[in-house]
Image (tube, rainbow, N blue to C red):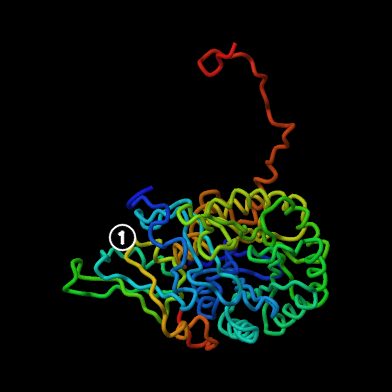
Amino acid sequence: MTGTEKKYAGLNPIPPEFAKAQPPLALVVEDDCIGCDRCIPLCFFNAIVMIDKPEHKYKRVAVVDPDNCTACGLCFEACPTDAFVWVPDYSNGRHVPRNKTDLEDRDL
Amino acid sequence: MSTKDAARLHTSFIGFDLKSPLIVASGTASHDVKQVQIAEEKGFGAVVLKTVCSEKYDHMRYWPRPRYKLLDWDKQIGGRSKQFTLYSYEQGYSGTLDDYWEFISVSKAKAKIPIVGSAFADVPEDWVDLARRIEQSGADAVELDISSPHRPGSLGFQETFVAAIKSVVEAVSIPVLVKLAPGSDVLGESIVAEQCGAAAVTLCNRLRGIDVDIESQRPILHGSYAGVGGPWTKYYNFRHVAEAAGSLKIPISASGGVMTAEDAIKYVLLGANTVQILSVIMVNGWDTAAQINSGILSYLERKGLNSLEDIRGKALRQLTPPDKIVRWSGEPKKGPRNDWD
């Protein structure tokens, strides 16, 4: 299989190398985003929002909210242009609310 | 929803009056208080909380990243794939044990629907400890997740889990559900669970599976076995529910592969009392519950029925034993595919 016909289009089947030392976090490469809205419903943690960006080719782009992103990997599957990449989460996962104990205030 | 419709969806299950036969299965969609509230609002009858693991399996609450992969997911049609696999490396509840007790009590305070705690351990003492704490925290029932796809392979049903079910049933006064995995002897294990005093069985858990990347020649994600499930699992589970329903007196909570109201109705026709869903909530959203509930209602309307109880096990009673199937002898036929003499 070649080109776009990859078996694992999107999320690489193996986590990024840096994931051994640093927790990964999803990030949208804005130039690759086509504003198609596919990732929004598939993100179970409401961590992706569309924002208006007049200078962008499609006038709007998806942005990952690191506070809600649990780095589960589902958005990679939604994206038809493979615009998601892993970046190191330098907060070391601290700001991921799902691991906190404040049951009252946590966001999904 | 009209009062008539509400009454039609009404389901009795292990002593509870559920407003719908739909239950959120243990997993990502039952991992915190807000989700329990959403589940109630969206029309679920009950919630089985994410499984908590004993201290010994503390590592299970730390999830690797990423922890999911959707296999065979057609991204070009935006997730309307009819067949896919949610390949998951998410294991236990991610908080501490104390968080879990608080999670149960706050959920109970904030929602009216029954809350079922879920636990995993190995030795009976740990099982009893978790189950007691779940009861004390206010849960309405406890589900023993003895079949988690992430459990250590060394723990066998006969050696480990029979004792666990027995001791938990003795130790707590709330109903005990036993969750089994699809496999060669679901019926036998269900019967043992019933004999041990389980109030219901949940059929079935996800399967332990694995996929390989042929480029790097390694197992995908984190290199270990993962939990696999998806719409395709329903055909195994229909069978397990049918077999169990034919032999058990305790109710069955069916689970696995439900995407639509039709799937849920099929489980009921095969003898299930309630239907648990999870993967479909994750990929299609919380509104799935309303879609399934209204699908069930329109089916009942079309068939002139008052409740699912009227058709429960109806297909099961139509099951034909192999020796009663009408068969015909293989008389010779003409045509290219029969041309062997």
**Residue that protrudes farthest toward the top in the picture:** B341
Q: Nearer the viewer, residue B220 or B260?
A: B220
**Residue that protrudes farthest toward the left in the picture:** A55
Q: Residue at x 45, y 70 (%)?
A: A17
Q: What residue did someone put label 1 on? A: A81
The chain holding disc 1 is: A
Element marked by disc 1: loop
- Among the 4 quarters of the image, the one containing residue B141: bottom right
**Could you tell me residue A83's position as x and y percent?**
32, 65
Q: Vertically, is B170 above or below B223?
A: below
**Could you tell me residue A26's position as x and y percent?**
39, 72
B72 left or right of B95 in image: left
Q: Residue at x 60, y 11 (%)?
A: B341
Q: In this orientation, does residue B260 appear?
A: no
Q: Residue at x 47, y 82 (%)?
A: A93
Q: How many marks?
A: 1
Q: Vertically, is B72 above or below B144?
A: above
Q: What amino acid does circle 1 point to?
A: Thr
Q: Residue at x 65, y 65 (%)?
A: B148
A103 left or right of B166 in image: left
Q: Nearer the viewer, residue A76 or B261?
A: A76
- Among the 4 quarters of the image, the one containing residue A29: bottom left
A79 left or right of A21 in image: left
**Could you tell me residue B222's position as x and y percent?**
53, 66
